[in-house]
Image (cartoon, rainbow, N blue to C red):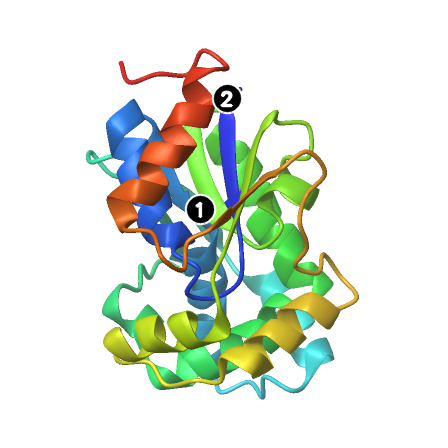
Amino acid sequence: MTVIAIDGPAASGKSSVATRLARRLSFAHVNSGAMYRAVTWEILRQQIDPSHPESIEAAVHRMSVDSGFTEAGESFIRINSEMPDLELQTLEVNQNVSPVAAIPAVRSLVNTQLRTLAEKRPIVSEGRDIGSVVFPDTPYKFYLDASPEVRRQRRAAQGLHDSIEKRDKLDSSRANAPLKIASGAYVIDTSHLTLEGVVDKVAEILSKSGIRPA
């Protein structure tokens, strides 16, 4: 099992970096955030109040979930026979994903899917606890960060206007798998780096461990 773990707060660049890096290395790309968004979308679709953990936990135990890879090497998740796509980026999902993702039953469900995917092929996976909780034994850990102002600008460019500070507080202070720098992770400030610049830096570090483009 080969896992490259990329963690960091919202809009630190981890999704874009993970996607480009996976392509460069011919690894599969696993987007854990999309999985949490998919669960949140299903919770909202069932008209369950995101502020009721017990109701969400009960719904999670009823869910039929499977995941896999597309031909392009991107992960997908299917919930109750539905595979959401653009729905994952709606404002409602964006506003509720942090509290839903903090629920232990939700994290357990997603972590199981992540570990199952990693058994199938080498992956680059990004999130908030990939290196600290999901794959703590991988030697390939990175933590991307950027200034709050830069991250706000990036979110706005994506058409999202949620509060970076609120997301940071929710992700860092939750009792279950809070956002933190994993032990042994390389920390990279992406504030003033281009996307390719960050990918190059990560790839350079990996090459010293023997992981290079196929």
Q: Which residue is mark 2?
A: 2
Task: Note whether residue 146 is visible.
Answer: yes
- Label 1: few (<14), some or many (≥20) within 10 Å? some
Task: Out of 163 and 41, give the one closest to the viewer.
Answer: 163
Q: CA distance from mark 1 to mark 2?
A: 21 Å
Q: Quadrant of residue 74?
A: top left
Task: Out of 150 and 122, give the one closest to the viewer.
Answer: 150
Residue found at x 33% / y 62%:
82
Task: Note whether residue 69 is visible.
Answer: no
Please tell me which of labels 1 and 2 falls first in the chain.
Answer: 2
58 w.r.t. 95: above or below = above
Residue found at the far left of this picture: 71
Q: Is residue 4 left or right of residue 176?
A: left
Secondary structure found at label 1: strand
Q: Which residue is mark 1?
A: 66
Secondary structure found at label 2: loop
115 w.r.t. 139: above or below = below
Q: Which amino acid, by three-letter code, is at mark 1?
A: Asp
Q: Quadrant of residue 28?
A: top left
